[in-house]
């Protein structure tokens, strides 16, 4: 390889725009997602998963040290709630600031933070794989989630209205698993993950031509580990 080719390769690697991400072979997904739970992220499910999560080095929010130096006195529950609120607010702000792109939104739902990723914002239009822009977005999300790692996350895929509900479920689960695999490849612990496909359930827009594009999405709901 001559010097020009070496320089070009270095530039491409630095910019990441010359390197197209491809999901690994499907028969390896189970290995990548080992430790993830394929169910809804209910309170009961989180409680059952907590020992596994803690055993893999996970921590709860009250162990993060947030506000500990500022609040030395007072009721423990009050202090713990303040720590939790501050922690999740910091997570929400960093996600919102980093994800100002079309088709992506960051919302607050109680103490949870929800990232909505319209399919076309993270996946190729006619191919069931993550796009270059999508890989860049998911890399940013993974980096922030690794910083705010005292959390669980539910990665849920959705489709638009489809006659064949079996196909809708399969497509929605495929999207969710692809996102989970990418995040696992970028050091997000699978012990924090719940992965589900919900088919055409829970539409967030009308089922017209424009609304269908919005309903095809992946939602990442992040909740505090406690």
Image: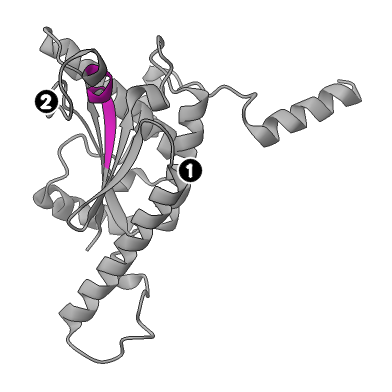
Q: Along the polypeptide, which appears first: circle 2 or circle 1?
A: 1
Would you identify the image quadrant in which residue 59 lies?
bottom left
Residue drawn at x 37%, y 62% as measured from the top left: 90
| Residue 225, image x, y percentages | 25, 59
Which residue was labeled with disc 2? 201
Measured Cα–Cα span from mark 2 to mark 1 = 28 Å
Residue drawn at x 25%, y 92% as measured from the top left: 73
For disc 1, the neighbor class at 10 Å (few under 14, some 14 to 19, many from 20) is some
Would you identify the image quadrant in which residue 194 lies?
top left
Which residue was labeled with disc 1? 140
Quick check: can you spot residue 57? no
| Residue 108, image x, y percentages | 24, 52
Residue drawn at x 33%, y 71% as measured from the top left: 63
Residue lying farthest to the right in this orientation: 3
Query: Magenta residues?
Result: 212-220
Magenta run includes residue 217: yes
């Amino acid at each position: 390889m001559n010097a020009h080719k070496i320089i070009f390769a270095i530039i491409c690697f630095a910019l990441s725009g010359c390197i197209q991400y491809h999901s690994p072979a499907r028969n390896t997904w189970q290995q990548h997602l080992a430790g993830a739970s394929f169910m809804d992220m209910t309170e009961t499910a989180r409680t059952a998963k907590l020992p596994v999560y803690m055993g893999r080095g996970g921590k709860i929010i009250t162990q993060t040290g947030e506000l500990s130096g500022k609040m030395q006195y007072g009721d423990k529950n009050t202090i713990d709630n303040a720590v939790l609120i501050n922690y999740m607010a910091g997570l929400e702000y960093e996600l919102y600031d980093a994800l100002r792109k079309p088709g992506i939104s960051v919302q607050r739902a109680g103490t949870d933070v929800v990232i909505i990723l319209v399919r076309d914002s993270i996946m190729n239009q006619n191919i069931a794989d993550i796009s270059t822009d999508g890989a860049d977005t998911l890399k940013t999300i993974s980096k922030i989630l690794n910083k705010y790692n005292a959390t669980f996350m539910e990665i849920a895929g959705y489709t638009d209205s489809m006659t064949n509900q079996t196909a809708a479920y399969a497509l929605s689960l495929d999207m969710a698993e692809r996102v989970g695999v990418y995040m696992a490849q970028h050091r997000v612990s699978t012990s924090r993950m719940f992965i589900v496909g919900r088919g055409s359930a829970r539409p967030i827009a009308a089922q017209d031509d424009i609304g269908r594009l919005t309903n095809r999405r992946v939602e990442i709901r992040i909740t505090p580990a406690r």
